[in-house]
Image (cartoon, coloured by chain):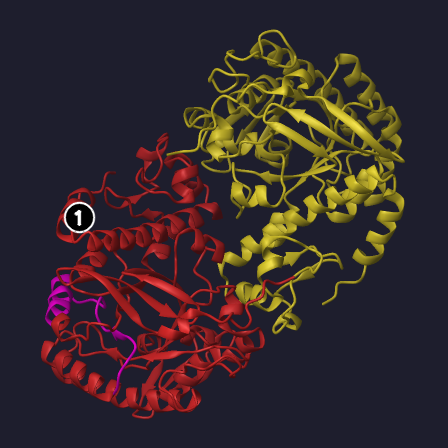
Chain colours: A yellow, B red
Amino acid sequence: MLRPYGPLPPSPYFTAMFELEIDATSGSARAGVLTLPHGTVETPAFMPVGTQGTVRALSPADLEAAGAEMILANTYHLHVRPGEDVVAKLGGLHRFMAWDRPLLTDSGGFQVFSLEGFRQVSEDGVEFQSHVDGGRRFLSPERATEIQWILGADVAMAFDHVVPGGADGAAARDAMDRTLRWLERCAKRHRELAGGALINQGPTGQTGPTGQTGPTSQTLWPILQGGTHLELRTEGLRRILDLGDWTGLAIGGLSVGEPKPVMYAMLEALEPRLPRECPRYLMGVGFPEDLVAAVERGTDLFDCVAPTRNGRNGSAFTSDGPVNIRNAVFREDNRPLDDACDCETCRSFSRGYLRHLFMAEELLGLRLLSLHNVRFLIRLAAEMRAAVRRDDLPRWAADWRRRYAQPETV
Amino acid sequence: MLRPYGPLPPSPYFTAMFELEIDATSGSARAGVLTLPHGTVETPAFMPVGTQGTVRALSPADLEAAGAEMILANTYHLHVRPGEDVVAKLGGLHRFMAWDRPLLTDSGGFQVFSLEGFRQVSEDGVEFQSHVDGGRRFLSPERATEIQWILGADVAMAFDHVVPGGADGAAARDAMDRTLRWLERCAKRHRELAGGALINQGPTGQTGPTGQTGPTSQTLWPILQGGTHLELRTEGLRRILDLGDWTGLAIGGLSVGEPKPVMYAMLEALEPRLPRECPRYLMGVGFPEDLVAAVERGTDLFDCVAPTRNGRNGSAFTSDGPVNIRNAVFREDNRPLDDACDCETCRSFSRGYLRHLFMAEELLGLRLLSLHNVRFLIRLAAEMRAAVRRDDLPRWAADWRRRYAQPETV
């Protein structure tokens, strides 16, 4: 009875697998279409995060209805539970999650480096204690690449050394150098797994990452580190580009505690140095104002747990700025959460009802606000795409900020 | 942007409002169509319970997809939070919940009598302590009727005195006598609210329960009590029928701790005495085997929190009997939860993935098992309808029991 998520049908994607086709620009901002084995992604795009193989409180059908074209899962979390072997036996990550569109796995670098006090870093890799069972585990560039190959997402990420936002130059350089050495090891292991190609552009019939036969492919994207130190970032970028022709490039280690203007300045400085046809993925960014600022500065892809985490806390993004639905002013408010939104939550329910769900601790509330917040960011990205295609992003952004930046209405 | 849930369109329902049309029988079992202001309900039917104005973990769209034609909400819960005044200001219970199909409210009797130690019963009504804020509240036949009128469900229930399953004859008689006296007071108050008619069969343009104009109607159903004492039940039934021509009749105070054979024997004894064209609602019954036994004994409507509560605990009804999805045998099980089921859960996800969701404490697991369990009972009722219409219920029930009654597969 299960829906088939097996081999993909023969597809025109193969002519342009893993390519981003930019079809419009507006200042530094770009709009385009990224082609991946499981489908296309219009950029700029926000990717919801399915940490443990599920975007918290949402179903695949909810995500499709919200317009998600690509989502994330976390290698660290899936490795410690249920284990990549279990995911493989259950048909690979797409089949496991019942998500048949593009999928990206983070490498686990960010997670293991967050386990302050529960990990030991060496040149070889990181030994850490599982947050689930306390057992000792080990992730290295090779292991992270192998696990991601087994999970079988469209895009795998290189295993990186992440430092906190305030790290000094020496610590940031050390982590960046290590990340670059690790990138070479990730790429080597990925090439071996893919049978020689840095990108596994297997023809139909080849054995793909999850063991099934079919045109399954996976690419590996590097992650640029370097903290808040521009000279490290530019050096790191040059060295990454010297290592090969990547199909995408991620900017990591931002939005990790540094002031927002620092992040914005860094993106501005990097933008002219980034290859044009390469999708630029700003990791961990998902507040509306940051998405707008980052698109203006030439980035294409974003992910963050903010929409779902905030949603579960009763906090909603709206066109008029954030609101907390628990606020007593919403008690008898018959209006939708956001009158400019087209999600199921805003089409069906009043603020008063949503508040009731949170006050009564009903599960439906967690889901409805998560769904709205995810739709909000996906729609925000779509509006920016449209504005870029009209070459009208500056005016659109000014209008958007004027409405959004109002003080919280509550 | 909110979907309209205002006045209903002129409808053929008015020619037969609140009528059950029996179109087939098989032994004592019946199949039919119940017409209510917000639509029709094919019987036998299982009604999911939306205690606080939401069926836990499920959305109205989920319930529609599961085939629910009628659901419940609880007067006690909605009275203490958010209050019927708030529900009315938010457009009445249908609009509040975004449920535009038939809706029934329980009177609160069952809930307040469960508040052992936090309530005082008098002939006038029940004073109790709110479980939300500890404040003193009062429910009487009149108040319960008024609150339900304000909530505006299609069917309101009379305020009853419920005794535990093991209550002795004296306690059961006392409660039954009180329930009958209270029924007269409920009916009187309901007639006043409805402008003279026991059923408010208002023509288009009349002011309905929630204050909106339109063909809104509500009926009131009595609840038969009497504990496990057949002579009390038969006397109670006779006295209820002497009070008027009811559009439905509920059997309360069963499935409250008494042995199952006692409940079955009671239903068998009552069946020949029940008016044929009156829908028979067995309150609080929702385990699959009980649904089958009760339909065989001539009842039509059922409600229970079991499918959602059990679902949240990881316990699922399946065609082969109940399973607990947390069991380690499901770790790498690629089969659907129930290969005979057509719900979203069984169409999309493997047992291994569902187990992972529960082990990882992911919200989606609670929803997917709740959805499946609700669909299971709704489909069970639909299969029994079909069997009755084929006049084949005994054989169907024997086959069903043979498969379902297997020991838990885990």
> Image check: B354 left or right of A174?
left
Residue B321, x across and y down, in percent: 23, 45
Residue B177 among those drawn in magenta: no
Chain bearing tag 1 is B
- The magenta span reads B244-269
At 46% from the left and 32% from the top, the residue drawn is A96
Quarter of the N terminus of chain A within the rendering: top left
At 36% from the left and 33% from the top, the residue drawn is B331
Q: Dividing the picture into quarters, in which one does residue A332 lie?
A: bottom right
Hey, which residue is sitting farthest top in the picture?
Answer: A196
User: Which residue, given by chain and number where applicable, does mark 1 sit on?
Assistant: B396
* Image: B181 above or below A410: below
> Image check: A13 left or right of B20?
right
Residue A70, x across and y down, in percent: 62, 34
Q: Nearer the viewer, residue A88 or B263?
A: B263
Q: Is residue A110 visible?
A: yes
Q: Callout 1: 10 Å neighbours few (<14), some, many (20+)?
A: some
Count the numbered circles shown: 1
Residue A293, x across and y down, in percent: 82, 43
Q: Is residue A106 visible?
A: no
Q: Amino acid at mark 1?
A: Trp
* Image: A104 above or below A380: above
Residue A44, x across and y down, in percent: 75, 36
At 55% from the left and 68% from the top, the residue drawn is B5
* Image: A242 above or below B74: above
> Image check: A359 left or right of A293?
left
> Image check: A379 left or right of A25?
left
Quarter of the C terminus of chain A within the rendering: bottom right
Q: Dividing the picture into quarters, in which one does residue A128 lie?
A: top right
Disc 1 element: helix
